[in-house]
Image (cartoon, rainbow, N blue to C red):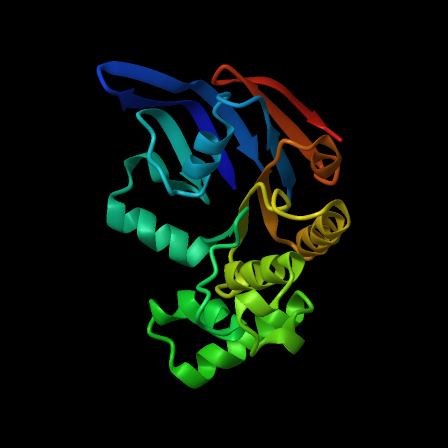
Amino acid sequence: MIRMTDVQKSYRAGEINLQVLKGISLSIQAGEFVAIMGPSGSGKTTLLNIIGCLDSVDGGQYTLDEEPVDQATDDDLARIRNQHIGFVFQLFNLIPRISAVRNVELPLIYTGTPPAKRQQLALDAMQRVAIADRAQHTPSQLSGGQQQRVAIARALINNPELLVADEPTGSLDSATGLEIMALFRELNEAGTTIVMVTHEDHIASHAGRIIRLKDGLIDTDVGT
């Protein structure tokens, strides 16, 4: 599903050019569950953003489902994100003033899906992650774990082949974090490819493979 060859990424910081990724080469097969780890500044979030087509490469090649992402335009990247990738973030990124089900519906608004069908698909996604009974609650009426389940349902609404997660348990207590990891394993066993950034070893251990970065390069790449 994912193939990267000598991927490089730099950012400007004033007059300084900061090279974050210095030549990443990796492959991830469809159906894998991969955790990306590394110290602060190692490039793990930058790598995840490139995998999720939230950022572009400066050099090297990136192919997602045989599509050359490194050559994609902004419109191409938006289409790939919308059709193929679901996103889960540490801080949930829910809109506080609307209900959970309306939050889950949001990606479908951009595809022109009729309102009635949007709601049914959203409820189906919420049922899949065991949060449908909180459909009419606003985020402030939900616990952290419930909010993350809503965010995961939103990520699944378009049936993405790839789920990209950035510290998905970082804002949760240990017990709730383990519940979310159990949910991730269920999704992965059902066929969803998952790539997750985490700084916690016990969370990474739920993945089938751990890629550790150091100074913008892959330090180790092993199965768990």
In the foreground, 70 or 102: 102
Residue at 34% over, 30% down? 57
Q: Dividing the image into 4 quarters, which one contains the C terminus? A: top right
Outermost bottom residue: 116
Is residue 214 something one can see in this rendering? Answer: yes
Quarter-of-image position of residue 8: top left
- Vertical relation: 10 (above or below) 192: above
Q: How many marks?
A: 0
**Measured from the top left, where is residue 7 in percent x and y?**
40, 24
Residue 43: horizontal and vertical position, in percent?
A: 47, 24
As displayed, is residue 123 above or below residue 163?
below
Position of residue 40 relative to residue 97, above or below, is above
Is residue 30 visible to us here?
A: no
Q: Is residue 92 left or right of residue 143?
A: left
Please tell me which residue is depicted at 48% across the width and 21% down the height of the picture.
41
Q: Is 44 placed left or right of 186 in the picture?
A: left
- Is 118 displayed left or right of 9 in the figure? right
Residue 90's place in the image compared with 103, above or below, is above
Give percent across and percent down for residue 23: 43, 18
Say which residue appears at 33% left-offset and 35% top-offset.
56
Residue 64's image quarter? Answer: top left
Quadrant in the rendering for residue 71: top left
* Residue 3 image point, x, y percent: 48, 33
